Image (cartoon, rainbow, N blue to C red):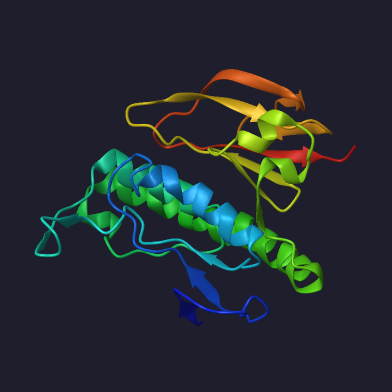
Amino acid sequence: MVEVRVGYRNQDLPIFVRMMDKDSNWGYNNGLRTIIPSALTLGILGYPYILPDMIGGNAYEAGFHETRLPDRELYIRWVQLTAFLPAMQFSIAPWQYDEEVVQISKRYVELHETFVTPLVLKFAKEALKDGSPIIRPLWWLAPGDEQSQIEDSEFLIGDEVLVAPILDQGRTFRDVYLPPGGTWQDCRDGSVYNGGQTLKDVPVPLGDVAYYTMLEI
C-alpha cells in the first residue's frame, strides 16, 4: 500500500494518489462538494487509484492549533460517498459520535468491501490495459449528452454503477440524472428506469445513498 500526494509521469504505477486535505464543510470551498470533481479530474488525468482525503475532512479549527469533530450529518454523508470510491480512510472514528453513526459506518464499510471493491478490481484491469479511469464522469457513457457533461454530483464506477450521494446539509431527497444509452435499476428497491431522464425528488434518508446498476441492453 503506497500513497503519494504528488508525482510526475507515474500514472502507470500501482500506487494510491491521494487528494489534498479537505476541509470539514459541505461546500465547494474545499469541502464535501469537491470530492467528486477531484476524483473525476484525477481519473481523467490517468490516475485511477484514487485515495480520498480523511472521512469528514481534517476538522482543522483556528488554523492547525486545535481540532473539532465535524458535523455529525456531514460525517455520515462523507462516509457514504467514499464507500463508493476505491478506498476509505478514517482519521476520526465513528464511535466518537454515537451508536447510529457506528452502525451506518459499519454498513458502508461492508458495502465497500463486498460490492464496490470487486468493481474497483474489475475496472482496474481496464486501467492497466488502456488507462480508463475506474471512477468515471457520466459523459463517459454519453459523450454528446449536455447534462452528462456538466453533472458534478454523480459519478460512475466503471460502466456499471451510478452513484448519486447527498451533498447538501439537511437534505433527505435529491434529483438523480440517468445518462442515456441504457436502462438503470435502483439498487435499493429494484425499480427500473430508462436512461436520459431526471428522477425528481428521489428519497434518500440519512442512512441511505441512491445508487443504480446498468442493466444489459
The reply to whether residue 213 is visible in this rendering is yes
| Residue sitting at the far front | 8
Q: Tally the marks.
A: 0
Q: Position of residue 102 (x, y in %)?
A: 32, 51
Relative to 133, does residue 29 appear above or below in the rendering? above
Left or right: where does residue 213 sit relative to residue 15? right
Q: Residue at x 58, y 39 (%)?
A: 154
Relative to 73, does residue 125 appear above or below in the rendering? below
| Quadrant placement of the C terminus | top right
Relative to 116, does residue 46 appear above or below in the rendering? below
Q: Residue at x 71, y 68 (%)?
A: 124
Q: Residue at x 22, y 49 (%)?
A: 97
Q: Position of residue 135 (x, y in %)?
A: 63, 55
Task: Give 212 or 13, whichever is nearer the viewer.
Answer: 13
| Residue sitting at the far right | 217
Q: Position of residue 161 (x, y in %)?
A: 69, 45
Task: Give 111 or 2, whichever is nearer the viewer.
Answer: 2
Q: Position of residue 171 (x, y in %)?
A: 38, 26
Left or right: where does residue 102 sit relative to residue 156? left
Say which quarter of the image contains residue 68.
bottom left
Task: Give 125 or 147, whichever is nearer the viewer.
Answer: 147
The reply to whether residue 186 is visible in this rendering is no
Q: Residue at x 66, y 66 (%)?
A: 46
